[in-house]
Amino acid sequence: MRILKDFKVPNFKFPKFHMKEMSEIDEVKVDYEKLKKAEENKVKKNKKQYQGTSFTTVKEMFINSSKEFADRTLLLEKFNPKGDWTEITYNQFKNEVIGLGTALTRKLNLKDSRVVIIGENTHHWYLSYMTMLCGAGIAVPVDKELPENEIENVIKRSKAKAVIFSTRKADAIKKVADNLPDVNYFIQMNSNQEIDGRFVGLDYLIEEGKALVTGGDNSFMSIEIDPDEFKVLIFTSGTTSNAKGVMLCNRNLAENVNAATAYVKLTPDDRLMSILPLHHTYESSIGFLLPFGVGASISVCQGLKHIVPDLQETKPTALLTVPLLVETLYRKINANIKKSKKDGLVNSMIHVTNALKTVGVDIKRKVFNEIYENLGGRIRIIVSAAAPIDAKIGKWVEDIGILFLQGYGLTETAPIAALTPDYDPRVGSAGKAVVGAEIRINNPNENGEGEVLISSKTLMLGYYEDEEATKEAIFEEDGKRWFHSGDIGYMDKDGFLYITGRSKNVIVTQNGKNIYPEEIELMLSKHTEIKECMVYGQEVKGEKELIITARVIPNYEVIEEKYGKDLDEDKIYKIIWDKIKEVNKELTSYKAVKKLEIKHDEFVKTTTMKIKRYAELKKDK
């Protein structure tokens, strides 16, 4: 789930906010007689889960949605940055999947072969992945940011017989092709090239397959899918070429859709924006298969620097993202509000609208219309997963009227294991075990914290060619398979899970106390002077105790605004250290940060924008 990637937060730009007073908003009409009655009978929320889907395979879902939503839009994508958005319907997508699947299995004889898919989020990535899941072979999604030697290594380790790649990856694939004699075909997206040795165009194959289907070949759609058969191979993060390979089946992926639809109400009128990389299970399962299963549409973000215009042009209703992007949107929007000198007004309107909402009068969308318009005008849900987020930010999202949900899982759980239901959101929680899953805390300490254990229908088959690692990660008890997540957390009385750290990151003091860096990082990140930070235990020669150290990237923009321009390093260090001292006052003494390191370059990050601690510290050595 965590694959190496350098990531730089893009510079989102929003126009100046004007923010009208409530009395100036014509549409805001409050019926005070109705309000009085509502206050007397406080609105009770219906906390009942939905009737979710019940798919056993992705192919079953593919057939159902292709028929039920045939004429509806599935994908919106700009194939030319200066052009218009292209809409691809469910019916068009269905015909392309069947065409490609027929060509791969009948023309190239690749049935049941492993096929690597590598490239940016694009129509042909979705198409290739769905074709594999519907019976063409075993999909091996690969991070497009991997260096050439790692791409070559993954292709070899997976024993891939074909590689489907985007045009942007063409040079890298051609460089390693000669080192991959066992690969039968290299298939380029957005290419009509006929078979030339081992190279061929994906568009050419689609048309060849369609011709076979027109001639009566129905072999691809006749392929029966075993729900428990190995169908997807995803290599998790690793700083070496020995990353573990997670083996998933059709049932794992279908159960993700079933689980999510029981907790979150999505309809064909919803639209998700695809921002995160598709090779990650979070995006390919919840960002693709989930909307596909309910007939919703997906707009493909052209890149993080285009996120604001893409939001405004495609008007999504839901964003599936990670904390760093939510935090960036939060800071940029609030910085603009502050520059417009409307922060006091906005805070007042939040208090008033919150009070009204508690008695059933919700006028937030009208009051905060200007913020909504900058996000496309239709946003109703933001889902954050992959790492903890400051609860203050989640609360702000809800304060302006957007439902804020959080999810939790790993590649090994394909990925969703817990999710906050939209009918009972709990800001700060990672959610409760999804339908078909159980979560328990192993050996909890006095605070109820311990390792999170997961038993779920979405749990992987095992690690690829690594029986020993599989046995270490999964154990059986009372007829159930349980997974050691490696995450530390606790559960409240209602069964909601709270993640407090990762066991691999834990800093153990000489007297046996455990310190979870994530807890301290979350507290530090509340200070706007700190852009990003990583807390770790630094080894010091001659000392037995690790030194709790904070490595910080200062937020120079905020510091300049608050403290003035042209500050030297010593002054910036002092500003950050003063903030650390404030945090230390809130911590027990053994958790206090003792050392500060100012970082000038970007952290090494995963595709879900989490700091890769091991790689960061390895750079030091």
Image (spheres, rainbow, N blue to C red):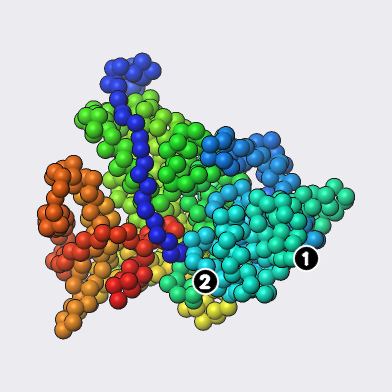
Instruction: Tell me if 437 is positioned left or right of 445 in this view.
Output: right
Residue type at mark 1 is: Asn
Label 2: which secondary element: helix
Q: Residue at x 45, y 64 (%)?
A: 3
Q: Residue 109, which numbered label?
A: 1
As measured in the structure, the alpha-carbon distance from the residue carrying label 2 to the one carrying label 1 is 28 Å
> How many neighbours does mark 1 have within 10 angstroms: few (below 14), some (14-19), or many (20 or more)?
few
Q: Residue at x 34, y 31 (%)?
A: 15
113 relative to 204, above or below: below
Between tags 2 and 1, which lies in front? 2
Which of 540 and 228 lies nearest the eye of the viewer? 540
How far across and down, in percent of the image, does residue 186 sit?
A: 67, 63
273 relative to 490, above or below: above
Label 1: which secondary element: loop
Q: Residue at x 40, y 32 (%)?
A: 374
Q: Residue at x 32, y 64 (%)?
A: 501
Which of 405 and 379 lies nearest the eye of the viewer? 379
How far across and down, in percent of the image, does residue 66 sit?
A: 70, 44
Which of 415 and 447 lies nearest the eye of the viewer? 415
Instruction: Tell me if 602 is positioned left or right of 84 in this view.
Output: left
Residue type at mark 2 is: Asn
- Residue 134 picture quarter: bottom right
- Residue 221 seen in the figure: no
Instruction: Tell me if 579 is positioned left or right of 157 in this view.
Output: left
Q: Which residue is mark 2?
A: 149
Q: How many marks?
A: 2
- Residue 388 picture quarter: bottom left
> How many neighbours does mark 2 have within 10 angstroms: few (below 14), some (14-19), or many (20 or more)?
few
- Residue 28 picture quarter: top left
